[in-house]
Image (tube, rainbow, N blue to C red):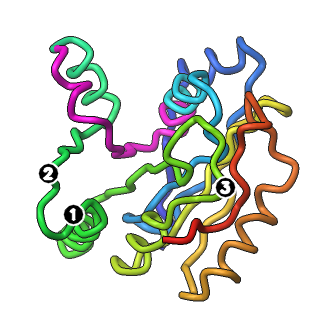
Amino acid sequence: MVVPLRGNAVARAVLRLFGWRVVCPAMPARQGVMIAWPHTSNWDFPVAMLARAACGLPLTWWAKESLFRWPLFGSWIRWLGARPLARNRGPQGTVGLMVDELKAAKAEDRFLWMGLSPEGTRKRTEGWKSGFYRVALEADVPVALTLLDFGRREVRLEHAWRLSGDAQADLAAMAAACEGTRGCKHHKAAPVRLLEK
């Protein structure tokens, strides 16, 4: 199933004003996991949020619960698609909660794409956290990759995969898709490989 997107012309115009281009074809399914790479700067957030609006993608993402304590800011990021991530996540943990949400959305035929940064931080790491991979496999949903390319001034949502369960092969395909992408602070970009647990 291919799900077409209808974007926001104002967001596209703002991005064009700053020299950015967005490439966002239709989504491969009504539910999935969206990962954005590389995450190296505070500038990633406004660029990604404008691109999200320009594509017309109602993306759900998680933020620290403490960010929601400020009423205006909390309301604003909720409007952008954020949900609070509590420290006490229950026995199933964050992965289990996300899997349950995606399975429920599939059962209800409800649109739900969850956005994650596989690096988990703007600091340099030695690879990607495995949470996104486990969520997509356990919920049986595709993974889509958004590239934040400050070199070309492009946000590209061009690649989506059904994971095979062979993490090495799947990450090799993702690494090939990431080739040539430059983050805002490219030296902080994590290599495309899963971190050991």
Q: Which residue is mark 3?
A: 126
Q: Which residues are magenta?
A: 51-70
Q: Amino acid at mark 3?
A: Glu
What element does badge 2 sit on? loop
Residue at horizontal 39%, vertical 45%? 59
Q: Which residue is mark 2?
A: 88
Pick the residue in front: 1 or 76: 76
119 with respect to 109 (left or right) = right
Q: Residue at x 57, y 87 (%)?
A: 164
**Residue 158 x %, y %:** 69, 56
Give the number of the disc on residue 32: none
Give the side of residue 162 with respect to residue 141, left or right: right
**Between marks 3 and 2, how big is the CA–CA gap?**
27 Å
Query: Was residue 48 drawn as part of the magenta stretch in this picture?
Result: no
Mark 1–mark 2 Cα distance, whole angstroms, equals 12 Å
Image marks 3 and 1: residues in contact by CB distance under 8 Å: no
Residue labelled with disc 1: 97
